[in-house]
RNA sequence: GUGGAUUUAGCUCAGCUGGCUAGAGCACGAGGUUGUGGUCCUCGGGGUCGCGGGUUCGAAUCCCGUAAUCCACCCCA
């Protein structure tokens, strides 16, 4: 009977060494930048009670979950996002947690959707949440963290743009101009799509949502202020002139905060940023790549009712999520992903001695860290050391292998020198080499590494 | 859930309208060189031609089904 062949399940990825290194690179930057901004890492279960996801989501979204029933008939689902877990965790411990709560997580998430560019069924999603501060200060902080991370990846104003809006202010503006309060949901539905549709498609959308002539006229004006044409700026100015003064000054105030934080070049007020679902209550934002070809790199905003929805106290919150799939595509397209992210060995031990013991001993010594006498700190770090698993003693062949491994140094153990109690340390970048006593090998290797090539391959 | 394209060696692909044991380049391994490198030369391992049916004397090639991938629609937390 022939063995069956297997493929990874639809929409999942295997992480071979190269792609695993890319994933680690991305996660390391997310983690490093989060910590730098004073956030601490959390995580939760990869699956939760189905009911947790029913709290704030519609049927459409629940139908996109990986759903299963355990042997005790409990309904469970793989997490499609981290926010419900986070809200549950905060709600449970809210009384005892120091505030504000600044948490981040890098969970693996699952959605049973049709895979396409930038969207898979299993992905990593960086989640950042700032809970317990109702002011725009936390909005600004969260936005700042997002920008800082994108810059850490090497992205610039040429590569991405952040559009921001404010649900509350936008509602006021719309209601004060033309939208009837009971039509606000429809208005957001339309606003969310205006920027992506042609005039004909917009017209069809208006019909579908039962817009009268007056509404159509207003929405067309909104559409002009969204599309990134020459008229967008003036159109937005004209539009805003009809908004309440309080709304305009609030927008100006936040614009000032963005400017104060040095983010003015990255962010712009954009009435087209609505962020789909209803739970956002104030500030919202979305990171788009400049080409406009990809889906959003990240998105988030304020959801002050969130913790209450999951049974906790009333706690204001703001946060965002960034997935690894779109980010990696953008980094690749922009040439911002280093070609080879695998760790580069410090030393390749070339053993041309018949007796394997000296080389084995050297490898062990180089890999071992040396600790202070009290064992409390590392005096000398252990090195990343590799060697050949081939039987040949041909130094040329072994050096070729050392070069292929992109090691920074080679240490050559060969009969002639070894008889004299020395070995050779070779710098694989400039090809220089020198003899050192075997007894000082470890110290000399550390010294040589200071002048050796870079630690990353690039 | 819907539509289009695709699937041949580890990778990138050839294989015309069906015809002898299925090919190339790169990569990998061994040797040429029992002491100094990414070049070169020789040799070598590797493929149920996505999978399952069907048509045919004969299928990688034609037909049907199915899975996956890519792209788009729906949706997008």
Image (tube, grey):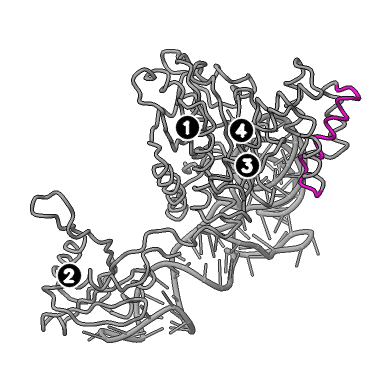
Outermost right residue: A213
The mark nearer the N terminus, 3 or 1, is: 1
Dot 4 lies on which element? strand
User: Where does the image place residue A157, in percent across and percent down from the top left?
Assistant: 61, 54
- Relative to A425, say whether A456 is above or below: above
Tell me, yes or no, whether the two marked residues, 2 and 3, touch with CB atoms within 8 Å: no
Residue at horizontal 49 percent and vertical 47 percent from the top: A149
The answer to if A221 sits in the magenta stretch is yes
Between circles 3 and 1, the one closer to the viewer is 1
Residue A237 appears anywhere in the view: yes
> Which residue is under mark 4?
A284
Same chain for mark 2 and mark 3? The answer is: yes
Cα gap from disc 3 to disc 4, whole angstroms: 13 Å
Residue at horizontal 67 percent and vertical 31 percent from the top: A274
> Which residue is under mark 2?
A443
- Relative to A417, say whether A401 is above or below: above
Between circles 4 and 2, the one closer to the viewer is 4
The mark nearer the N terminus, 4 or 1, is: 1
User: Where does the image place residue A221, in percent across and percent down from the top left?
Assistant: 84, 35
Cα gap from disc 4 to disc 2, whole angstroms: 55 Å
The mark nearer the N terminus, 4 or 2, is: 4
Question: Which residue is more in the foreground, A335 or A426?
Answer: A335
Tell me, yes or no, whether the two marked residues, 2 and 1, touch with CB atoms within 8 Å: no
The mark nearer the N terminus, 2 or 3, is: 3
> Which residue is under mark 3?
A296
Question: Which residue is more in the foreground, A335 or A219?
Answer: A219
User: Where does the image place residue A441, in percent across and percent down from the top left?
Assistant: 16, 72
Magenta stretch, residue numbers: A211-230
Q: Chain of mark 3?
A: A
Between circles 3 and 4, the one closer to the viewer is 4
């Amino acid at each position: 009977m022939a063995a069956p062949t297997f493929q990874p399940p639809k929409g999942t990825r295997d992480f071979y060494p190269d792609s695993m290194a890319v994933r680690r690179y991305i996660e390391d930057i997310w983690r490093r930048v989060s910590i730098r901004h004073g956030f601490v890492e959390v995580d939760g279960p990869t699956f939760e009670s189905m009911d947790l996801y029913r709290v704030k989501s519609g049927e459409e979204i629940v139908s996109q979950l990986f759903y299963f029933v355990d042997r005790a008939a409990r309904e469970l689902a793989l997490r499609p996002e981290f926010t419900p877990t986070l809200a549950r965790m905060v709600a449970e411990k809210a009384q005892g947690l120091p505030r504000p709560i600044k948490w981040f997580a890098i969970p693996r998430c699952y959605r049973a959707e049709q895979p396409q560019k930038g969207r898979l069924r299993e992905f990593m999603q960086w989640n950042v949440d700032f809970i317990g501060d109702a002011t725009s200060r936390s909005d600004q902080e969260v936005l700042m963290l997002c920008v800082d991370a994108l810059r850490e990846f090497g992205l610039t104003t040429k590569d991405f743009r952040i559009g921001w809006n404010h649900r509350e202010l936008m509602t006021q503006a719309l209601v004060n101009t033309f939208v009837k309060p009971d039509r606000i949901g429809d208005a957001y539905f339309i606003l969310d799509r205006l920027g992506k549709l042609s005039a004909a498609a917009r017209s069809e959308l208006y019909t579908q949502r039962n817009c009268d002539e007056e509404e159509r006229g207003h929405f067309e004006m909104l559409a002009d202020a969204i599309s990134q044409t020459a008229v967008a700026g003036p159109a937005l100015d004209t539009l805003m002139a009809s908004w309440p003064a309080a709304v305009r000054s609030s927008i100006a105030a936040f614009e000032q905060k963005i400017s104060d934080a040095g983010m003015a070049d990255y962010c712009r007020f954009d009435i087209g940023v609505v962020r789909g679902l209803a739970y956002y209550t104030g500030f919202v934002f979305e990171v788009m790549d400049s080409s406009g070809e990809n889906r959003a790199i990240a998105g988030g905003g304020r959801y002050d009712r969130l913790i209450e929805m999951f049974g906790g106290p009333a706690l204001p919150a703001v946060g965002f999520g960034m997935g690894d799939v779109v980010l990696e595509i953008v980094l690749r397209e922009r040439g911002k992903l280093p070609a080879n992210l695998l760790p580069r060995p410090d030393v390749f031990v070339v053993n041309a001695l018949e007796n394997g013991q000296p080389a084995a001993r050297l490898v062990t010594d180089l890999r071992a860290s040396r600790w202070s006498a009290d064992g409390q700190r590392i005096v000398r770090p252990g090195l990343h050391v590799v060697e050949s698993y081939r039987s040949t003693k041909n130094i040329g062949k072994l050096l070729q292998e050392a070069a292929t491994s992109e090691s920074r140094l080679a240490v050559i153990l060969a009969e002639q020198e070894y008889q004299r109690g020395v070995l050779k340390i070779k710098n694989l970048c400039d090809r220089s080499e020198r003899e050192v006593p075997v007894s000082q090998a470890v110290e000399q290797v550390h010294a040589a590494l200071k002048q050796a090539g870079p630690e990353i391959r690039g």
